Amino acid sequence: MKKYIFIILAIVAVVAIGGYYFLFGKKDVCKNVIPEDAKAVMVLDSKQLVKQIGIDSSDILGFLQSDKNKKEDLGIDLLSPIYGFLSNESYLCGVMALSDADDFEEAIKKEGISVESQRGFKWAYNKEMIVCYDDEKALLLGPISQTESHNMRPRMVEWMSQSSSKNPMLSSVLKQDGALCLSSKMSVVPGSYMHQVLQYLNNPFDMDKVFLNAELSIKEKSLHLSASVESDEEEIKDLVSKADGILQPIQASQLRSSASDPLLWVGFNAKGASLLEGMRKNSVLRLFLVGVNLCVDADMMLKAVDGDVCFELSDITSQQANYTLKAQVTNQDFLKNANEWNTGFLGKSFSFKSIDKNNYMLQGAGSTTYFGVKDNIAYFSSNQNVTSNEGSNTSDNFVSNNKSEIEGKIIYASISMNKLSRLPEIQNMMGKDSQMLNVFFDKMDRFTVSATDYLHYDIELTTKEDISDFIKQFLK
């Protein structure tokens, strides 16, 4: 009897293993193609994607095996990981497993593209892209001219023939759990942007030794991108160490929001003295401070800040933008000379008026700004009643509703996708597609960027409905 039980268990194990590979693809044949000197590596893990979306494998198989999709079979194994990389020559490359090389070749020829055999592989070129494939996998590279593509063929053969990959970034992406994972040298960031960042930091880093890792995960009602910067460079470590005293974890206890769904909300926690010192070290920000100090005692304001700071843009109407900037302060010494601001540079363009000893009004350029201090909270606002109309009910308060997400971050910024899409400028940009995009935006909730420290960041797009419902509608 025990013998038969053992045989039955063995059969069940074989069937289970076979079913696993049937549902989630065959052996990973693509990762070995990644060259050791690639500048960036990406992987789309179909198994994780299906798991995170929460769709049954039967739905996927039904979609793939439907008559409609059978007629358009490209011979690509959609259930195996798909890899992408940026070559050392700066070409974008993709590697995908093939379910049927003959179907793949037939799909290419249907597009009027000729296929040739060379160096033990088959080749096709069209519209600045070259394709190299065998019975198991296909490598796509571009954009590239036809002349340059001939020069790259030896390199592509070398990659396709590798039995393993020694790229360190490949090891990094394979350790991540996201549906889409990336590891990249920071040197691939566009030069003009990176030049501005390095100029701001006043440090000549070797960006080939600084890495960006990111993974995209799909949750019930959100797309979540987690990113981190890694480096063994001492200059990077020194920079992070010096910046530690500027931003602190947000407390989210004293500052409240005036709206439950503001167009924009940005918060951080700072020691003003350290922030001021850091700003003075940068030439651009130092010049900015000089200009602001011609109007108000900006240096004293910044030195007084110690705690949470938040900027809230409730909405933008045709008449004005409804905004509020608040900051926890240790003193209000910066208001001692407020009555003299009318006589300075400010008085030439603006009208300054005292409401009482702690609250003031500034008029000019067609707008009015109210500012002052109440209960150790300094504020600048377009609303005179900003200190009295804060959402006291937690159901009407953005900060209270999202305290668990905001608290502990060194910076947190969130945008209402629905309100953003309603802005006239955005509507004009969308043009003829505005109706279709409005439907999309109506299903979106908020877009949020946050950081737990200087090297770890989170980007999240939340939705009003379950993401799996969107996918199921697509698969029908």
Image (spheres, helix red, strand yellow):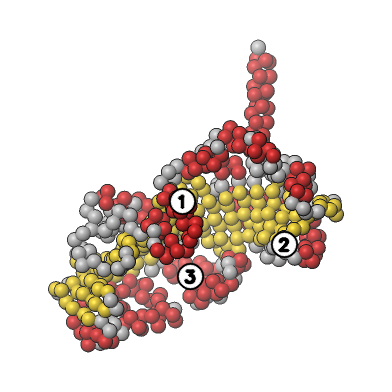
Pinpoint residue 130: horizontal percent, then vertical percent: 75, 58
Q: Mark 3 or mark 1: which comes first in sequence?
A: 3
For the residues carrying marks 1 and 2, which lies nearer the camera in this image?
A: 1
Q: CA distance from mark 1 to mark 2?
A: 33 Å
Judged from the image, the secondary structure of the residue bearing numbered disc 1 is helix
Q: Mark 2 or mark 3: which comes first in sequence?
A: 2
Pinpoint residue 212: horizontal percent, then vertical percent: 56, 60
Q: Mark 1 near mark 2, Cβ–Cβ under 8 Å?
A: no
Numbered tag placed on residue 361 in the rendering: none
At label 1, counting other C-alpha atoms closer than 10 Å, the crowd grade (few under 14, some 14-19, many 20 or more) is some
Q: Kindly give the residue lying farthest to the top in the view shown.
A: 1
Residue 409 visible in the shown view: no
- Say which residue appears at 38% left-offset and 76% top-offset: 277
Residue of label 1: 440
Q: Kindly give the residue lying farthest to the left in the view shown.
A: 356
For the residues carrying marks 3 and 1, which lies nearer the camera in this image?
A: 1
Residue of label 2: 128
Question: For this view, does 323 lie left or right of residue 222?
Answer: left
Report which quarter residue 296 is drawn in: bottom left
Pinpoint residue 294: horizontal percent, then vertical percent: 31, 85
Q: Mark 1 or mark 2: which comes first in sequence?
A: 2
Quadrant location of the C terminus? top right
Numbered tag placed on residue 239 in the rendering: 3
